[in-house]
Image (tube, coloured by chain):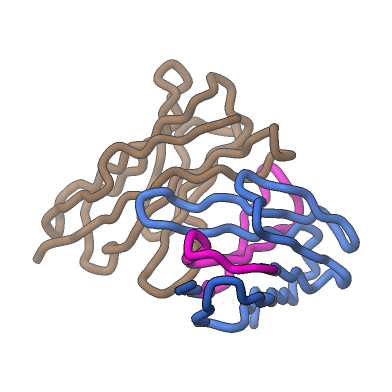
Chain colours: A blue, B brown
Amino acid sequence: NAGVTQTPKFRVLKTGQSMTLLCAQDMNHEYMYWYRQDPGMGLRLIHYSVGEGTTAKGEVPDGYNVSRLKKQNFLLGLESAAPSQTSVYFCASSYGSGNSPLHFGNGTRLTVT
Amino acid sequence: AQSVTQLGSHVSVSEGALVLLRCNYSSSVPPYLFWYVQYPNQGLQLLLKYTSAATLVKGINGFEAEFKKSETSFHLTKPSAHMSDAAEYFCAVSDKEYGNKLVFGAGTILRVKS
């Protein structure tokens, strides 16, 4: 079972460059999320989606955009990368909200120089 | 918005000793509470969740957590630590401000000494 797959696993960007992180899930989940993980700060929600064609802002949405054109995919874009966006990014999906557990990908480690 | 506090960014125990990881949340009425575990270079995995059915919740790998409303706590315990328990543990609470999406604590790294 693939579960939640994130690509790429690693990426180095220069300040001002753009990139897109791809998340794909094969569990037919309605909800998908993007989190960033920074040392000592846990995981912070960037954006989320409650279904195909919908997106919403989380705790730290500035500097990021997302799209959910297909139910199984959730894209995270950085239009103009900044060093403050150096982080590990995790995608997750769930069947519903509230008490539905999240299924996580293995993360994308992004460094912005 | 909800907040989660995990006391102790690092906890070290001997193999066979009791594991106690502390978690406190900000609201007196949290909808749902969770513990997740993260092994190196992996995503998070669900250990257990509280959904108001019972105050003592049992999870995988011998872990359990007790919900105490009066203390706004949801501490994670395991009677006897194993080397394979070494990982980072995250407490999380659903937040109505973000449509019941999860808010995570800062994490506690558990080290198990032989």
Residue at the far top: name it: B70
**A48 is higher (above) or lower (below) than A4:** above
Q: Would residue A30 be found to the left or right of residue B34 on screen?
A: right
- Name which quarter of the figure residue A15 lies in: bottom right
Quick one: B30 or B63, which is closer to the camera?
B30
**Magenta span covers which residues?**
A79-108
Could you say where residue B82 lies in the image, as x and y percent from the top left? 22, 63
Q: Please give the count of numbered marks on the rendered protein.
A: 0
Q: Quadrant of residue B76?
A: top left
Q: Give the x, y percent position of residue B31.
A: 63, 31
Return the x and y of residue A16 as percentages of the image width and height: 60, 71
Relative depth, front residue between B68 and B106? B106
Quadrant of the drawing holding the C terminus of chain A? bottom left
Q: Of B13 and A111, which appears nearest the observer?
A: A111
- Residue A60 on the magenta segment: no
Q: Is residue A79 above or below residue B56?
A: below
Residue visible at 64% across and 68% down?
A: A80
